[in-house]
């Protein structure tokens, strides 16, 4: 009976954790670039009352007799499936159609995100809503350039899409901006000419589920995600960029509400284990009367 009490308690704790994850998913149903999570349970070590035995002459084999000791948390997975794109027609709103993550710099730290609601700050840098610098391959100015557009040298497409060096993209003194599906950032100069300023950088991972959420819809690389492979749109498995759109949350409300019902019933059933075990213990104590 004591085993059943502890099994019930382990079930209550797990279902509370699952409810916490579901609540977080639902609260982020309209968060741009959010990736939902799920909770996976596994059983705990079972107490072996009798081991299995092999068959012998005149006697058959027997199966093991084991009593389970409850459940435990096996994993909290992040689901990195792509979500629907919302059209905004804002030239600095970007959605990745396929795999890949935008590369952003926060101080000396490098992070990754699917949220493409980007802006130009007061110094002309392309940044996220949190002020992190968006990284990419950037062109250069000519040796005798007096301003941002005079003598500008268009950025070249990286060989095989490989990026070896992650620069911040600056559009200071350009009077207009556009971004195409290849991630080419073009600026309209004061002379009316259009210049290829930069390529938006994308990061690819061997195991995206190994990325760590750090808030602000940002991810950090971990030992199990593998090191980031930097590239540009359309190369090395990376998707294209959809300018003028935003990737929405991949939370499926129908699934979340269904999981909520299942979790509620699971919590309720585990609470019944505890109350029933308590009733059995009460009957045992009453034997003394």
Image: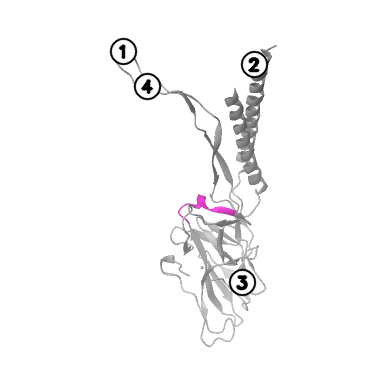
Specify the segment rendered in magenta: 205-213
Residue positioned 62% across, 77% down in the render: 172
Q: What element carries label 1?
A: loop
Residue 46 visible in the shown view: yes
Residue positioned 67% across, 47% down in the render: 27
- CA separation in Å, label 2 and label 4: 35 Å
Front tag of 4 and 3: 4
Read off the residue under disc 2: 284
The outermost residue toward the left is 57
Which of disc 4 and disc 2 is earlier in sequence? Answer: 4
Camera-side residue of 42 and 255: 42
Front tag of 1 and 2: 2
Read off the residue under disc 3: 125
Residue 35: image x %, image y %? Answer: 58, 50
Quarter assignment of residue 41? top right
Read off the residue under disc 1: 58
CB atoms of marks 1 and 2 within 8 Å: no
Which of disc 3 and disc 4 is earlier in sequence? Answer: 4
CB atoms of marks 4 and 3 within 8 Å: no
- CA separation in Å, label 2 and label 3: 74 Å
């Amino acid at each position: 009976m004591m085993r059943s009490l502890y099994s019930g308690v382990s079930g209550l704790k797990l279902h509370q954790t699952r409810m916490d994850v579901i609540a977080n998913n639902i609260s982020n149903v309209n968060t741009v670039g959010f990736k939902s999570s799920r909770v996976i349970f596994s059983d705990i070590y079972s107490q072996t009352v009798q081991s299995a035995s092999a068959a012998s002459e005149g006697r058959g084999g027997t199966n093991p007799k084991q009593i389970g000791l409850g459940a435990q948390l096996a994993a909290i997975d992040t689901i990195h499936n792509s979500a629907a794109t919302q059209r905004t027609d804002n030239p600095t709103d970007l959605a990745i159609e396929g795999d890949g993550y935008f590369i952003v710099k926060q101080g000396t730290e490098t992070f990754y995100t699917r949220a493409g609601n980007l802006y130009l700050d007061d110094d002309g840098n392309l940044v996220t809503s949190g002020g992190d610098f968006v990284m990419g391959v950037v062109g250069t100015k000519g040796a005798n350039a007096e301003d941002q557009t005079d003598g500008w040298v268009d950025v070249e497409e990286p060989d095989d899409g490989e990026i070896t060096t992650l620069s911040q993209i600056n559009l200071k003194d350009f009077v207009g901006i556009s971004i195409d599906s290849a991630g080419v950032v073009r600026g309209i100069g004061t002379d009316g000419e259009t210049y290829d300023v930069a390529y938006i950088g994308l990061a690819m991972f061997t195991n995206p589920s190994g990325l760590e959420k750090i808030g602000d819809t940002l991810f950090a690389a971990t030992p199990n995600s593998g090191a980031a492979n930097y590239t540009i749109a359309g190369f090395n498995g990376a998707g294209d960029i959809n300018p003028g759109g935003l990737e929405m949350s991949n939370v499926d409300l129908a699934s979340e509400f269904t999981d909520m019902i299942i979790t509620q019933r699971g919590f309720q059933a585990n609470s019944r284990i505890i109350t029933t075990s308590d009733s059995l213990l009460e009957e045992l104590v009453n034997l003394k009367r």
